[in-house]
Amino acid sequence: MLRHFASAERKLGSVLGAQARPQRNYHSKLGVWGYRPVTKRVYEVAEEVRQARNAQGNVYRWVEAFRQHGHKLASVNPISIKASSNQSELQELNPAFYGLQTQQTVRTAGLLSAPTSAQNVAQLEQLLRDIYCSNAASAEFAYVENTEEREWLAQNFESLYERQLQSTERLEIAELLIKSQAWDNFMALKFPTVKRYSGEGAESMLAFFWQLLRDSVQANIEHVVLAMPHRGRTPLQAALLNMRPAKVFRKLSGASEFADDIEAMSDVISHFHVSEQLQVLGKSINFSMVRNPSHLEAANPVAMGKTRSKQQSRGDGAFSTESSAQPFGQHVLNVILHGDAAFAGQGINQECLHMAYVPHFEVGGSLHLIVNNQVGFTTPGERGRSTEYASDLAKSIQAPVFHVNGDDPEALALITNLAFRYQREFHKDIFIDLNCYRRWGHNELDDPTFTNPLVYQIVHQRQSVPDLYAAELARQGVLSAEQSSQLREKYIAYLNEELALAPTYQPPASYFEQQWAGLKLAPGNELTYWDTGLDYGLLHWIGQQSAAYPADFNIHPHLLKTFVQGRLKKLEAGAKIDWATAEALAIGSLMYQGHNVRISGEDVGRGTFSHRHAMLVDQQTNEMYVPLNHMEGGKGGKLELAHSILSEEAVLGFEYGMAIDNPQNLIIWEAQFGDFANGAQIMIDAFIVSGESKWMESNALVMLLPHGYDGAASEHSSCRIERYLQLSDSKETAPDGDSVNVHVVNPTTPAQYYHVLRRQLARNFRKPLVVVAPKTLLRLPAATSTHEDFQPGTLFHNVLGDSTVQPEEVRKVIICSGKHYYNLVEERAKRQVQDTAIVRLESLCPFPVQELQAQLAQYGEVQSFVWSQEEHRNMGAWTFVRPRFENLIGKQLHYCGRCEAPTPATGIGKVHKREVDEIVAAPFEL
């Protein structure tokens, strides 16, 4: 049966061609904006090497066994409480396992890259153990499928065997380690009650950064973007990244890290950020450390997104104007530091790794360092994961891993150089697992001996990493004990000077500079209005371009009728303009004005509800075509459609990283359904809505969250409007200004959606925008706009009044938001009610008090005000709107909607129908 099926599959493949067979491909062989296929490298092992290996097949198998298993016997743990491994316990490494005799003559040419004079099996065994089973570094790469990469890794790792740093380089590393230790000792002395998350036990990471910066400038890297957790962050910033210690000391005295005239809630010192233009080896390089919350690993996709944004601005990779495709990462490098327990435990790492080589998310490979303290909070490694190594997740994308002893900063520098060269050569992710320790507990006020007494017996009895290295250099005559002491004393004196300056130190502005120049904080005491309309002649032309395709393009017949012909007809008439068309007009007009636009999410090209079709796929060739990117004229903005992996947290973090880097690009993330954003709550809470207040880091990220009760039960009905409103700093007792931290809109017309998208880049400030996006309104005939709604002088209206009633006859005003409006209008018409006005809150946050007052003022005989919503009473906007309405409008507001419930919607069809009838009727019967 299996044989028959395989035969049938081959026949099918011969009919349909190679694409009928399972393979990794993409919808474009020609490339689209943000993706260009790079020619795969062709590699073959040299003929003389193959002959040498065939001639000594058993010897070669034995060498390969060390490459695969040698790491199991390496002693790279500086605080191991286990007995030393017996290096003869692995039969795979025993020469007798391959029929080899101790004195048997061997020739290593073609088998081993390390310089060697080994003449027999015994000598070769010792060399292999020195390389692959050492106490300095070991390697894992046998699982890498690509032959060229495996050969490269073996050759270059083995060639490190006899490499040494120069004395001047050792001195530079020693100075950094001494400074790091001096910083932590100084902090412990001057601020003994502060949780500083020191780098003690992991000071060797300074050697990693020292080597990284040197390699980067020599490779003409212009930007390094770093994600890093809290441990060891401040000593790195102070010792190597030009951060003024006075900034930290001022903060610890109770002041802000920002200037006194900035009203920011600020953050703790272990979340401090650095963005510096560093001078290394006489060259300049920009080093940007992204902000980090205490949610471990959450900053990683942010760094990836920021890296890609810089690559776009620089014309790197697929954004290059060169005719030949280049891999990403030519000029911008992404670096990520992990904690050992967090890398294994936090699912966002899997999401990030599986974005690494996905079109429109790739950054040319990231360089990873796991700072392996061998404990997570108080949990030892064997209880924090189900694998041998903290780094084992890296194997899921076949990323090589080097394990390094944290007591050997020179080995780390050499491995860093090797990892950097691999990343440059192949533009793929690679990992260094730095085995070190945490001298204190989770923080300096914690006692780790409660739960890990044996480990901390070792830690407390041993010398520190800087002291061990200084002693070794003294033994070799490179750095005397007196010189080490002088370096330490000089740095301590500098720290004391900075401490004395802290009371008068004024932090320089680190915001609204460079690409953010010209922007500012939003006004706190007013709502501003922005003309976002354009001449309809131009919009008509842009709309036509959004539905254009080449003459030889095989379009889907259904799309030809409903999308292309339907859109062109609406545009020509200037009427019945639907949601998708309005979106195309907004995006296309921004592109025409020179802005790049990116829409990211799951299947965003066509849209979850098959409404967008910003991307067309040739039905014969499978080739992708993005019409707006072929629009001629204007200033040349481009549209990137980023079909994401099935992830919310990492993908949204990636988009946030892009949004904080370039304020002139419109970054949109669309959830498949609104409540799927639940999986990205960390990104929303810790970055998007709070980043400006904590870090003075603005963003104009747009989140499209499809919402609406249409019988789809709990998980596809509500985007949880209430959560975003609760996250806002909107006031209940005073009018809001544009400075509210997150703007939440629930537009009811395509034109309103058009204007709110364009407004994101028209304003002289940036705010994140949550759009309660429609589902049924996408095709509802009543929810359309005319050309007049887009003309110059038009704008987004925070409140839409009711022009269908006579104001003097109105006795009741129903206030609502979103698609529920159309249900109420239909019910009013059915009942032939004449005395009830229906007013729409298009903007929920900031709460538009003045506009709402202006609308209500025309109804002088109103007897009751009703808030009507389709959500349950403990959900939706009710608890947000009521106190603001009653406090600021001064009128009582009655509730009509579903009653309280533990889940957004029922899954019983009859119950849903009954609820719909009840909530639509209730406002008119109140």
Image: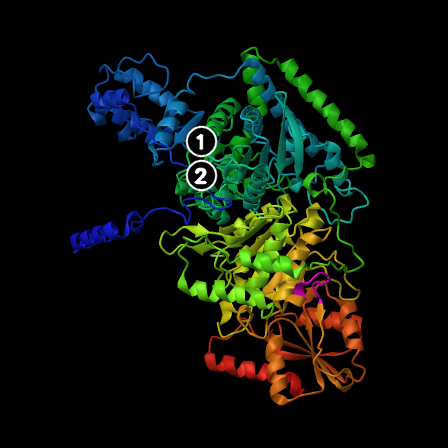
User: Identity of the amino acid at label 2?
Assistant: Ser
Q: Is residue 609 visible?
A: no
Magenta span includes 831? no
Residue at 76 percent of width and 71 percent of height: 852
Q: Secondary structure at mark 2?
A: loop
Q: Residue 170 at x, y = what percent?
A: 56, 18
Residue at 77 percent of width and 69 percent of height: 851
Q: Which residues are magenta?
A: 789-798
Image-based side of 551 in relation to 10, left or right: right
Asked if the residue under mark 2 is in contact with the one under mark 1, i.e. CB atoms within 8 Å, the reply is yes
128 or 870, nearer to the observer:
870
Q: Sequence-wise, which precedes: disc 1 or disc 2? A: 2
Q: Quadrant of residue 228?
A: top right
Q: What is the quadrant of the C terminus in the image?
A: bottom right
Image-based side of 702 in relation to 452, left or right: right
User: Identity of the amino acid at label 1?
Assistant: His
Q: Residue 67 at x, y = what percent?
A: 34, 28
